Amino acid sequence: MTHDSATGFISGYDLFDHAFGQAQAVGLKEQLDCGARSFDLRLVKTSGEIHFHHGETAILNWVSSQTLSGELPGLVEWAGEHPSQFVVLVVGHCAEKGWIEYSSKPCSDEEFVKPFTAQGVAFETKCDKLRNMTLAQAMKASALRNGGHLLAIDLDCVETNWKSDVTSAEQVQPYVAETMKQMQGSGKLFQIQALMQQKFLIQRSYQLNKEVASWITDTHLLDGVNFLEINTICAYGMAISRSLGATVSSTDADSCMQICKKKCPACDKEQPRERQDAGGWLI
C-alpha cells in the first residue's frame, strides 16, 4: 500500500509541496506498475469536482489538479490488463474545501462514492461485511466489466495504527512488531505504517524500505499483514510487493524502473542490484 498515494502528482518544480507532502514520486498508474496493490486515497471536493489532497488546514494544504474522475479510467484499464491482480482503493480524509475553510466529510457520502460507481468500481462502506469477506468474495465484489478487480473501501473500516511519535527510522521496527502482535487474530482490517511519521516536512528513507523488504523475506515479523503502507514505492517497492505475493511482470517492472529513474534518481541509486531475477528485475 502506498502512503498518501496521490502525492505522486506533485510537480518536481513545486518545491514547497514536494518537501511538505510528497510521499510518492510517480502517479497512480505507475505505482501499480511498481507493485502497489492498494492505495491511500485522500479526497477533497472543491469547485464542484473531487480532487486528491494532502493536509486539511486552510493554510497548509495541497490539492491536485488531477480529478478522481479523470484518473479512475486509467486504473480500471490497468486492472483489466492484469485480471489476476486484486487492487484495493482505501478512501479516507474526505473533505470539502472553500476559499478559506476545510470541512471534513464522510467518505461514504454520495458525492465521493459516485465517481467510483460511475466507472463500475464497487465502493464498500459496510465494515462488518468487509471484516467477514473471504478472498473469493472480495474478488467477486471487485469484478469489473473488463475482467479486472478494483474495490474501493472506506478508511473508517480499517484500523490505521497511526502513531505520531514514530518519527525516526529506528522506531519503525519496534512499532511494527508491537502493532502486528496487537492486530494478529483481531478480526479487523488493519494497516501497518512502515514509514516515519511527518512532523512538518515529509520524511523519506530509501534504506528503510530495504529493511522492510528484508523483514518480509527473512523474518516472520509481517506474517499476516493486511495493508503494509510505505513511502516512495520507487525504492524497493517491487521487492516488497513480490515478497507479499503480487505478480509484477517484466513489462511493468521495466516501465516502473524507467519512470522512477526519471522521477526519483536517488531511488535508482538505492536499488538492490545484487538481488535480481533472470530478467534483471527486483525479487
Image: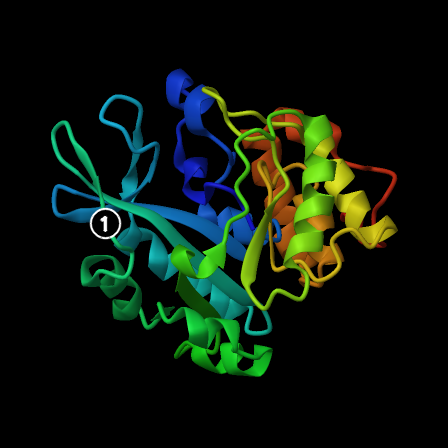
User: In the picture provided, is 198 more to the left or to the right than 13?
Assistant: right
User: In the picture provided, is 157 more to the left or to the right than 261?
Assistant: left
Residue 190: image x %, image y %?
Answer: 56, 57
* Residue in the picture at 76% in, 45% down: 213
Disc 1 is placed on an element classified as loop
Corner quadrant of residue 172: top right
Q: Which residue is labeled 1 in the image?
A: 105
**What amino acid type should be assigned to the residue bearing mark 1?**
Lys
Above or below: residue 245 compared with residue 148: above
Residue 59: image x %, image y %?
Answer: 25, 21
Residue 142 shows up from this direction: no
* Residue in the picture at 61% in, 60% down: 226
In depth, the one of 249 and 14 nearer the eye is 14
Residue 251: image x %, image y %?
Answer: 64, 56
In depth, the one of 282 and 196 nearer the eye is 196
**How many other residues sit within 10 Å of disc 1, few (<14), some (14-19) or many (≥20)?**
some
